[in-house]
Amino acid sequence: MSAKTTPPARSHAAAVLSGMFVVTGAIHFLRPGVFDPIVPRHLPGSSRSWTYASGCAEWVLAAIVASRRTRNLGGLLSAVFLLAVFPANVRTVRVVRRQPLTARLIAVARLPLQAPLIGLALRVGRGDAQ
């Protein structure tokens, strides 16, 4: 296989990861109030600024992963990003504890889902996504 050819499985995995970041990035701008309360309090500045910065970061990662030339770097950066935002996902469980059951279940379900997303990002980064 030539250097310019991307295995279909890797292209699919990269498309899934990139697409996920496009959608979640957009949600940060369309519904920032959902994310503001989960920004860790120890971070400087306003929660809204961090919400928007996170959405922008997700769009940048989507673009980097989508490009064959930068896909490996994008996968690795995506894994680091997903690890970095994990504390906010943990905080979500505390923030929604008095909300309806559906919101609480979604918050708890996100925690174990982070591991396979990080794994996908690492596989894209290594170039061996299946």
Image (spheres, rainbow, N blue to C red):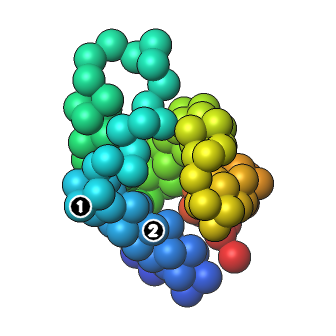
**Residue type at numbered disc 2:** Met
Q: Which residue is more in the foreground, 57 or 105? A: 105
Image depth: mark 2 or mark 1 in front: 1
20 with respect to 31 (left or right): right
Residue drawn at the location 48% of the way across and 25% of the way down: 40
Residue 82, located in which quarter of the rendered image?
Answer: top right
Q: Position of residue 87 (x, y in %)?
A: 60, 32
Residue drawn at the location 53% of the way across and 81% of the way down: 12
User: Mark on residue 20?
Assistant: 2
Q: Report the residue marked by disc 1.
A: 30
17 with respect to 32 (left or right): right
**Residue type at numbered disc 1:** Leu
Residue 120 can be seen in this image: no
Residue 126, located in which quarter of the rendered image?
Answer: bottom right
Quadrant that contains the N terminus: bottom right
Quadrant that contains the C terminus: bottom right
Residue 16 can be seen in this image: yes
Q: Position of residue 20 (x, y in %)?
A: 45, 68
When the figure is inspected, residue 130 is found, relative to residue 54, above or below; the finding is below
Q: Which residue is more in the foreground, 62 or 48? A: 48
Q: Which residue is more in the foreground, 38 or 1? A: 38
Residue at mark 2 to residue at mark 1: CA–CA distance: 15 Å
Q: Specify few, some or many for label 1: CA neighbours under 10 Å numbering under 14, 14-19, or 20 or more.
A: few
Q: Which residue is more in the foreground, 101 or 109? A: 101
Residue drawn at the location 40% of the way across and 17% of the way down: 43
Label 1 residue SS: helix
Q: Specify few, some or many for label 2: CA neighbours under 10 Å numbering under 14, 14-19, or 20 or more.
A: some
